[in-house]
Structures are given as structure tokens and as C-alpha cells.
Amino acid sequence: MREFLRRIRDSVFRTGWPEDERRALMAMRSSFLLHIHAAKVRPASLRATATWGLGLLSLFLFGSLVITGVYLMFYYVPHPDAAWRSMKDLAFVVPFGVVTRNLHRWGAHAMVALVLLHMGRVFLTGGYKAPREANWVAGVLLAILTLGLSFTGYLLPWDQLAYWAVTVGSKMVASVPGIGPATALLLLGDHTVGEAALLRFYVLHCVVLPLAVAGLVALHLYRVRKDGGLVTSEHAPAPAEGPRLLPAWPHLIYRELALLAGLVMALLVLSMVLDAPLEPQADPTRTPNPAKAPWYFLGIQELAHYSAFWGGVFVPAATIGVLILLPYVDRHDQGLGRYWPKERRTANTVFLLIAAFFVTETVIGTFFRGPAWALMWWPG
Amino acid sequence: MTAEPTLPRWLHVVVLGSLFLTAALVGVLLVHDAARPTQVEQRIVTELGVVDRCETCHDAADHPAPWLDDHAVERFGCTTCHGGQGLALTKAAAHEAGPDWEHPLYDASEREAACGACHEATTVVGAPGLSHGRALLAERGCAGCHSIPGFALPETAPQLDGLRDKVSAGWVHAWLTDPAPLNPGHKMPRFALTDAERDALVAFLFSLDGPALDPAPAAGDSDRGRLAVAQRRCTTCHRVDERGGDVGSDLTLAGAKLQPAWFSSFLVDTHRLRPATRMPGFKLSPEEAADIVAYAGEQWVPDADVPWSAQPDSVDPTLAATGRALFIDRGCAGCHRAGDVPRTRAAMALDDLGRRHVADLPQAGAAPTHDLPSWIATKVLVPAAFDVPGVAAAKMPAFTGLSADDALDLGIALAALRKDGVPGGWKVHAPALTASVPAGEVGALVDRFRCLVCHQLGGQGGAVAGVGLDGEGSRVRREWLVAFLQQPVTIRMDQSARMPVMGITEAEATKLAEWIGSSLADPAIPEGAVLGDPVAGATAYAARGCATCHVVHGEGTMKGPTLDGSGSRLDPDYVVALLAKGGTVVPGGRHPEGGLPEAEARDIAAWIASL
């Protein structure tokens, strides 16, 4: 019997537990999950400050969102009559319904934040430069898809918060000159947020966008490997002693494991302490004042308040355009792998100023805008 | 190649520590989840959109009687009447408000408002506040300004054409400033008007021509006038010096207020001057009218100056157009007819008020009102309560003489207004009016004498008279009725309202009595009862303690009608039915439950017939 079980185990884990470096390297090569990494990594890449784990945390969050999302799908009914009631079922009758919804909600917010931070890190360290241009573009697209996933998921609870945030969001889409109204119609399937919009958002949220993200993530990771792994500084002090390269097992894998375990624990604690927001059932006849988009769009909503076209359309579109074209325009190849190199001081200053601008606008839109979008000092 | 560095110790601590803590958290979740109810009792009423899990904790068998007899929980669920969050399975979530559920369980007033979502009749048994509120809606003319389902534009306010013939400009100024002192108990609310606005309104109203007045009669005699006022029983409807009814206006100052020519014309030709008035057409002779006017000029005047002596008495005709616009803007046209002004409503429709959330409504003061009836009550009592500085003030007038309870009842009635609140099949409509007044001569008489201002008939009409007209044809003898209509005698000493003497002729009285006798008989009272033994009846009368309320041969009390002479008044069939079946035979009657044996009832009826 033991022999039988061992045979099954060995068929799956070909190399056995990697007790020595040879078997560790074999494991890294032969394992489907592990061969994503190089068998050996530079010690500089292992330092926490090299990436802060942001990309990997985003990936882990995506995985946890898929798992919790599938569980929620068992109970969720994407119809205006039933959607909000599904939230109530999760709250009162579904086993672990509350904590699952909380995990999904907070995980989604965290993913949006971490994806954007990840992008910032890559920019500051010049990770978008040759030969990584295409992967940077893939990353920008993933960031957009992440926002799309969060936005489509935002509608599903069908409460006042969801309904009016998506109404505001779709109005912003519709205000784009030319293609705006048609795009909004395509998105909502109607002129207002209703039954058709809910179904479309549901399908986008549960099928289309996750598959797109999964595919692009595979490409993204593949290109990370093929483009030489993590961008590191050519000026990084070579280890005075010790090897130039370390086996990925256990040095990288254990660190990643620690990240995963820490993330799961942090998310669980958060989800057990703090419940995901839920407001009264969506009521198209009751407009909250102010109606606010999800937080990550509040910077744009704030800008749109000044000028619907310049703030609401031009600035976001230009930002995305610049981000995509950036690696093909900025071709200096100095100062990579460091956060504040002399050579990239101008580029990073401009980037940080722009980021600070968006953060400021978002904070203003979130905390300092009251009824009729009038400035106020503090909510309440 | 140098020695390979070993894995840092902290990494093991983080990984193992996180895994351990995660396992502990999952354990906590498992324990927590075990507390979730495993057996959920759920009522689903698809049509009403109700999914109620209240019975997971509550047993419907404990519900106080008799509400569930007509409102089975299988059919209505719980939250239809009680509010709260039916889906919830924790006490706090089910009973209280929270971020995702705005409203706690209904309080008493909200429960009554919930009754009104289905029950459309004015009077709803078991919901006194709702019923009273609906009566007040009609009485206070709310539908003059607001569209309220089931309430037409009020017709009780006087038509204002020819107002200058009736009163002075000063009086109108005073009236518009505050009607209450001039006519206590009057229903017109107090409007917040500036002097200039009052000038304009007076100018407009005094520009309207009214019906021509009769030629002024010779001066009347005030002594004869006093007699006429007493004989005609004017105080059944009108108040003088704080005594009398409140159907008509207060006459304490009528002698100073009314222009004599208009006053006498009105007494002679009431319905020509004021077609919609509630006052019967007495058709007084010009001489009798002149006597009453003379009496009023002596007695119905203030001791000192009239209250409106300080008011401007001049009229600036150029302001008439401004006044007309104001008349419409302030909603005057909702209640009053005046010239060619269309009857329009000046304020918002209230047909969906019951579905407004208090959270969306303005709040005043530090303590927010959490339930809709209370919010409405505040608004009704102090219309400016929710005014915001810098925003145009509310135009709603102040309704005087409303108590806090009255206002709450109005709040209940208005909070019951829910457009599409319940599917049509769930509505309980107002009972169809069972009897109606025929057209033709009888109808004209009933209209002229304004019978339904005081008497109930088929669910409509006023409640001034103690006796409704339904079934009256079975209760009294026709000959008696003919005589009574011509000269109404007082039957119920305990009631202050006495039927006015309207000068009904014998021919008219006969027509009315025929109609009452044939059309207004109660089919539940069998005819042709065989009377019993009057002697045994007299004994039974004494034994049953009838004298506690009735008077016979001068003995007894006057809580009920005196029975001396009632042999010619009461129909014996009715007496038998009343004694055998009880007070329910008279609508609103106070006679005790009968339940007497048929034979005993027939004996007493025989005795009463002999009185």
C-alpha cells in the first residue's frame, strides 16, 4: 500500500523533496508551477526592496478572488429582483457567506491598489525599457483589466452604492465625444443601469475579464522570464563573498510562500474584523447626493467636475496613451533597477508628480466632496 | 564557489507563524459559523415581494387576536404590516436600522399607515389614527393644494364672487392676516402674507362681480328677529358667543361683518348667492330676513371696535392682476371658486408620499425624526419647520386648532399613500355607497334642505344629526315623519344639535316621508310583527331597567329618547327587532345588545305602541 501511494506521489512530484541543490534545480525545472522561475536567481532580486512583492501579491490576490468568486457564484443571482437579496442570503444563511464576500471585496480593492503600486515600482526602476517594452504594455493592459474587473464587480450587489457608482461611471463613459454614447450603450445594454446592465456586468466580471486577465498574466509572467527576469542594477554591488547566483529553491520559493501566507492571514483578519459595505437595495428613483464612482475613479470624477471633456476624458485617455507609448519613446538605458538613480531623476520626478496629482485628486474626491460635489472639510 | 548561505531564520518564523495563525482564524470562523441558524422558517409572498424569516424566532400563534383572522401570515407575511428586515436572522438586523436597512420595525403609527396601503375606505376598523387622519384630510381641505388619491378638490369653501357686497375690505384684510380670532373653529388655514400681498388679494377679490342682490327691504324688527333666530334654530349650525354648532360660520360678529343688503338677500335666496353653501335654503320672507338682520345689527356686534377696525379699508384696483396671480400661486383656487380662475392645485402631489424615506427629507433640529408619520406631523404643525435659509420659504399655510395627535393622524393617513405600493388585488376598496338620493323632486328637496350636511346616508353625509337616514323608513311611522319634517320636535334630549326649522311645507314633507318610507327601509327588519300583551310589556319594561335611559310618564332619565308619545312615532316592527337584536339595528346606535326573547320584545312593543 505504501508502495502504491509512493508511486502516485512520484508520478506527480518527479524529483521528490529537494533536499540538496541538485534536486532543487531539478525540481525548479521539472515542476509546472516552479519552472516559471529560473532555477537560480540573483541575490539582489531576493531583497524585499527589489519589488516589495507587489506583482506577486497581485497574482495571489487574483487567485484568491477567483476562488472566493466561484464560491459566491453558487449563491448569486444576477437579476435586479434577486441580486441584493443574494447579499442578504450571504449575510444570514450561507455558510461562511459574510467572510467570503468580505475576502472578495477587500481582496479586490487591495488588488487594484497593489497593481497600481506595482506599475509605479516598475516605472521607477525603469523596468519598462528594452527588452521589456511589450511586457510593460501587457502590464498596462492588465492594470486596465483589473480596474474593469473591479468596476464590473462593483455593480453586482445591486445596492445604492453599486447602482449609483456605476451610473456615474457609465455617464463618464458616455461623455466621451464620438464613441462615448455607443460604448455606454454597449456596456449597459440600455440607456440606464438596469436588468441588461447587471447581466452584462456579471458575464464580464465572471467570465470575460477573468479569462482575459488569466491569459495576459500567463503572457506577462512568461515574458518576465524571457526578458531576463527582474530588472536589476548593473551597479548593484557584487556580493563580496557568497555565490553570484542562488538556487531559487528554497531562497525564492520560501520568500514567496511567506508572502502568500502573510497575505492570506492579513486578508482573513481584515475580513473577519471589517464587513464589506452594503447599502439599501438599488432604487433608481433615489439619487444619493453626491453620487460617487468607486474610489479608484474618484480622481477622474473630481477632474471631470472641472471639465467633463478635459478632466473626464482627455486626461485619463492621455495618461493611458502615454503609459503605453512610454517605452518606445524613452530609450535611455541608464540607471535601471534602482529607485532614484541620477540618470532617471527627471523621469521619476515627473512620474511622481503625476502620481501625486492623481492621488490628491482621488483623496479630494473621496473625502472632501459633499452634496452637489461641494467642497467640505470632513464627512459629516 | 563559496558556501551557500542558509535560509534566514525569520523566513521560517513568518511562514510557519502565518500558517498557524491562519489555521487558528479558520477555527474561529468554524465556531462562529456553527451559531448560524440551521433551520430557517420562511414565508414567501411573491406578489408582495415578501420573504420573511421572522418565524425562525417568532411563533405566529403568539400574535394577538384577532388580527391574523383576516390577515393570515401565509398570505401577508409579517413585514407587510410590521416592517423591519424580513430576510434577517439576527435580532438587531431584523428589528433595527442599519447601513443596509434604513428602517426599524414599524411603530404604532407606521403600522396604521401600513393598513392604509391596502385599506382605502375612510374609516378602517382597528386603525383609529388612520381613519381620523383621513377624515381630517377631507375636513381640512388638504386636497385643495395637494393631489391626494381619493380626495377631490374641496367644495366647502365659499365662492368669492361678489365678496365686496358681503364684507368690508378691512374685514378681508383681518381675515387674511389670521382667520382664527374672527371665526374660531373655522377650517381655513393662516397664510403667511405681507401687507402688499394682502392688498393685492383684496384688490383682486373686490374686482369680482357677484350675483345681483335683492332690493333692500324695509327696516326689520329686532325683537321679531330674535324670535326667528330661536325658532329656526340657527345655533344648531352657527356659533354665537361660544355657544352653538360649528357647521356654519361663527355669527358672534356677523352684524358688524356682513353688509345688511347682502345678509338679507342671502337669507331669502341662499342658494342663488352661494350655490355650494352647506346652509339649507330656508327661503325666508324678505320681512323675516330683515328682522334677523336687524337683530344681528343689534346683538351680533362687538362691544367696542370691531377687530378689523385698524385694517386698511381702501382698495387699489390696479393691483387686481397681481392679486389674481397670487390667488393661484398660494393655492386659494384649490378651495375657492372666484371669477374665471381655474381650480388648480398649487403644491406637490402626495400620491407617493408614503414611499419617501425620512433620510431623504430635510430635517430640523438636533433630533432627527425617524418615522414618516412624525415627520409629516411636524411639517403640518409647523410648515416652516424644514425651511432652509436662502431657499424660498414653504408656501404651506398654518392649520390652526390641530393638536399634536391630529397632526400625527394626518401623518398616518398621508404616509399610507403609496403609488403601486401593493398590487391591485390586495386593495380593499371603500364600500360602495349603498343608497343614493334620487333625482327629480325628492332629490331637489334633499339638496335644498341640505339633509346630508347633517345626516348620514349610505356611507356619505355629515355626522351632526344623531340619527342617520339609512333604515329610517322602518323605524318611524310615516304620518309622524310628515309632521316632524314640518315642525321638528326634539327627541333626544342628550344631543345639542336640534334640527333646524326650515319651513318645509306639508306637500314637501309628504314627498320626503314617502321616499324615506319606501326607499330607506331596513330590509333586515321584518314587517308585520304581532304585538303581545301591553300589560306584560309594562312589567318587562320595568324589570329590564329601561328607565335607566328612557322616560315614560315623566319617570326615568333622558340618556335615550323619551318614550312618552312614542306610540305614534315608532314603528312596532322596529321596536321588536331592536329589542330582540340590539343596538346594531340603528347605525351608530347606543341601545344595548337586545337579545330579549321574541315574546317579551313583542309585549314591550305593544306597551310602547300604547303610549
Image (cartoon, rainbow, N blue to C red):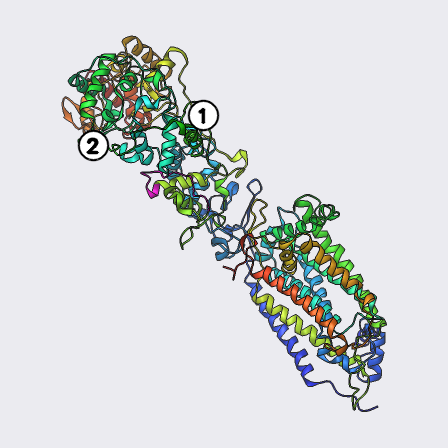
Residue at the image position 52 percent from the left and 39 percent from the top: B421
Q: Position of residue A198 (x, y in %)?
A: 67, 49
Of badges 1 and 2, nearer the viewer stands 2
The reply to whether label 1 and label 2 mark residues of one chain is: yes
Alpha-carbon span between mark 1 and mark 2: 35 Å
Residue at the image position 41 percent from the left and 51 percent from the top: B364
Q: Is residue A168 part of the magenta span, yes or no?
A: no
**Considering the numbered disc 1 on the image, is that residue within a helix, a strand or a loop?**
loop
Q: Which residue lies furthest to the left in this view?
A: B554
The residue segment tinted magenta is: B391-405
**Considering the numbered disc 2 on the image, is that residue within a helix, a strand or a loop?**
loop
* Disc number for residue B341: 1
Name the subunit of mark 2: B
* Badge 1 or badge 2: first in the primary sequence: 2
Where A64 falls versus B151 (above or below)? Answer: below
Q: Could you tell me the amino acid type at mark 1?
A: Val
Q: Which residue lies furthest to the top in this view?
A: B507
Image quadrant where one finds the N terminus of chain A: bottom right
Give the residue pinned by disc 2: B305
Q: Could you tell me the amino acid type at mark 2?
A: Asp
Task: Indicate left or right for A198 with B520 as reference.
Answer: right
What secondary structure characterizes most of the magenta part? loop
Task: Indicate left or right for B560 with A70 as reference.
Answer: left
Q: Which is nearer the eye, B98 or A289?
A: A289
Name the subunit of mark 1: B
Task: Indicate left or right for B595 with B541 as reference.
Answer: right
Q: How many discs mark residues in the rendered view?
A: 2
